[in-house]
């Protein structure tokens, strides 16, 4: 009797707590997004325009991580510079120094985590020029011994650059001190996460509205509850290889430390369990409006900025 009543009472409290969090999360999402937009209007990122880039994903066998990093950075990157002379060129890979934790569960991603990725641009939007450049780079990569290669034409937007973070989540670091001072070609001294995702099925009929929600709600909101020191969005405009996973976006996020990624109270800027539950629910509400949660693929990577405009 009494044990049942206590159990039932605790269950009611738990259900009530969950329902209250869900109810509060809608208004909180709108509040944080509006706050984030006002903050962003004063930042350099608000003046940056979308620029077309080519993005390549690479998969290779296990046990060759260091060779992959060295090939991409020391052999492939110089050849791409010679081939395309891009203003921006960055290499990402699962390198030997990578020890950062990933926050994603990777339930049923469209493809397994990549071994390497690089993105360069700006490039022309002309279809023939893009196709020709893609073919040349794919041939270059095959000559280097890479097996599976997938390519995309993306529009890249740097929302927050190193040293620019202006949100409230500054516990444990000083934003200005994260500005890029390390030399081009060396490893970024911060943990970096790569997230790849398809579009939410229900949003496919209106991609303009979908992109508006991503850029106008998800981006500004998340900047206010997550301590990201760099945030780069890549919107897929075209899959350039027939077997490329149907990703709609690829996001690159950098964090102040591994602790900021592994401690949920730092990761979601929460001072107590209630705020943590609310911020997690806000994030889930926004993310699931943009992408199918179960098909997200997220991994941590090493970042090597070879060139930067």
Image (cartoon, rainbow, N blue to C red):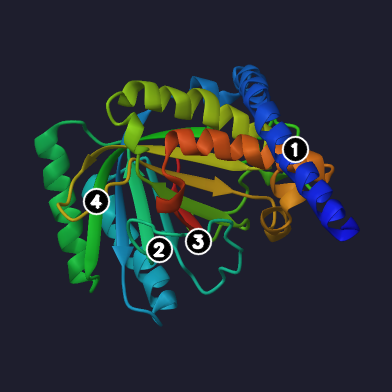
Between 57 and 120, the one lying in front of the other is: 57
Choose mark 1 or mark 2, whichever is in front.
Answer: 1
Residue drawn 75% across and 43% down?
276
For the point 45% across and 42% down, the residue is 308
Label 4 belongs to which residue? 151
Q: How far from the left and from the top, in percent, is residue 74?
A: 38, 66
Figure quadrant of the N terminus: bottom right
Disc 4: CA contacts within 10 A as few (<14), some (14-19) or many (>=20): many
Secondary structure at badge 3 equals strand
- For the residues labelled 1 and 3, the Cα–Cα distance comes to 40 Å
Q: Earlier in the sequence, mark 1 or mark 3?
A: 1
Q: Foreground residue, 135 or 149?
A: 149
Residue at the location (50% across, 57% down)? 303
Q: Is residue 23 left or right of residue 143?
A: right
Q: Which residue is mark 1?
A: 16
- Find residue 66 and report its image quarter: bottom left
Quarter placement of the C terminus:
top left
Q: Residue at x 33, y 60 (%)?
A: 111
Side of 177 where 127 appears, left or right: left
- The local crowd at label 3, few if under 14, some if 14 to 19, many if 20 or more residues have their Cα within 10 Å, is many
For the question of whether residue 309 can be seen, the reply is no
Numbered mark located on residue 301 in the image: 3
Earlier-in-chain disc, 1 versus 4:
1
Furthest residue to the front? 1
């Amino acid at each position: 009797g009494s044990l049942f009543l206590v159990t039932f009472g605790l269950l009611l409290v738990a259900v009530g707590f969950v329902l209250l969090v869900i109810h509060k999360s809608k208004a909180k999402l709108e509040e944080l997004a509006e706050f984030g937009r006002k903050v962003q209007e004063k930042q350099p990122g608000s003046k940056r325009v979308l620029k077309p880039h080519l993005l390549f994903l690479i998969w290779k066998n296990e046990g060759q991580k260091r060779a992959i990093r060295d090939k991409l950075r020391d052999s492939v990157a110089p050849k791409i510079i010679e081939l395309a002379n891009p203003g921006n060129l960055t290499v990402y890979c699962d390198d030997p120094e990578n020890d950062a934790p990933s926050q994603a569960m990777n339930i049923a991603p469209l493809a397994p985590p990549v071994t390497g990725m690089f993105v360069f641009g700006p490039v022309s939007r002309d279809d023939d020029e893009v196709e020709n450049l893609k073919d040349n780079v794919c041939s270059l990569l095959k000559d280097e011994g890479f097996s599976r290669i997938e390519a995309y034409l993306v529009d890249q937007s740097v929302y927050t650059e190193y040293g620019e973070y202006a949100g409230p989540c500054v516990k444990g670091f000083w934003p200005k001190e994260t500005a890029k001072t390390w030399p081009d070609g060396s490893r970024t001294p911060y943990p970096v996460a790569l997230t790849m995702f398809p579009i939410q099925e229900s949003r496919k009929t209106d991609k303009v509205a979908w992109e508006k929600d991503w850029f106008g709600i998800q981006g500004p909101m998340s900047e206010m509850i997550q301590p990201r020191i760099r945030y780069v969005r890549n919107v897929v405009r075209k899959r350039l290889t027939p077997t490329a996973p149907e990703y709609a976006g690829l996001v690159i996020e950098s964090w102040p430390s591994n602790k900021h990624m592994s401690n949920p109270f730092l990761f979601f800027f929460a001072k107590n369990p209630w705020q943590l539950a609310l911020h997690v629910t806000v994030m889930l509400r926004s993310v699931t409006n943009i992408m199918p949660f179960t098909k997200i693929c997220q991994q941590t990577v090493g970042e090597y900025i070879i060139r930067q405009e």
